[in-house]
Image (tube, helix red, strand yellow):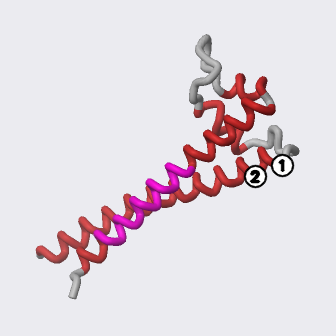
Amino acid sequence: MPNVIDILVGVELLFIGMFFCGSCFLVYREHLLMKYLKEHNYERWRELTSFGKYGPGLRNSFKALPYINGSQDNQIQEILRLKDSIKIFQRYAVSGFFASLINILLIVYVAQAIQK
């Protein structure tokens, strides 16, 4: 029969997987959004992928995240669909990250309690 630490480590692996998968899908969906913008709204793409005198074509999260979470271009159905899916994967990644941290603390606490 597995002990408590084994179960918590298994749960930790699930949280890490949730974080990793959420992050991978997030990056992929952001790529699809930028590809769509490049093909259909070049000026917006250029604005979002430029950084100072560099660009266009760079990955600039400082501009992309406010755009994704804002209301610009939400009247275009495809952009709204991509933004919504990105927001979902943002939640998965952040939830997995924080759940993983909490579970690590729980593992440490339980391991110390078992040793005493």
Q: Nearer the viewer, residue 67 or 34?
A: 34
Q: Main secondary structure of the magenta part?
A: helix
Q: How many marks?
A: 2
Please determine whether, in this image, residue 49 is positioned above or below residue 116. above
Q: Which residues are magenta?
A: 9-25
Residue 58 screen position, x and y as percent = 58, 24
Residue 14 screen position, x and y as percent = 40, 67
| Residue located 61% across and 39% down the image | 31
Q: Amino acid at mark 2?
A: Arg
Residue 69 screen position, x and y as percent = 70, 45
Q: Which residue is mark 1?
A: 77
Q: Are marks 2 and 1 in contact (CB under 8 Å)?
A: yes
Q: Which residue is mark 2?
A: 81
Q: Amino acid at mark 1?
A: Gln
Q: Nearer the viewer, residue 51 or 104?
A: 51
Q: Nearer the viewer, residue 11 or 105?
A: 11
Q: Nearer the viewer, residue 38 or 116?
A: 38
Q: Is residue 34 magenta?
A: no
Pick out the residue farthest to the front.
39
Q: Residues within 10 Å of mark 1 (few under 14, many from 20)?
A: few
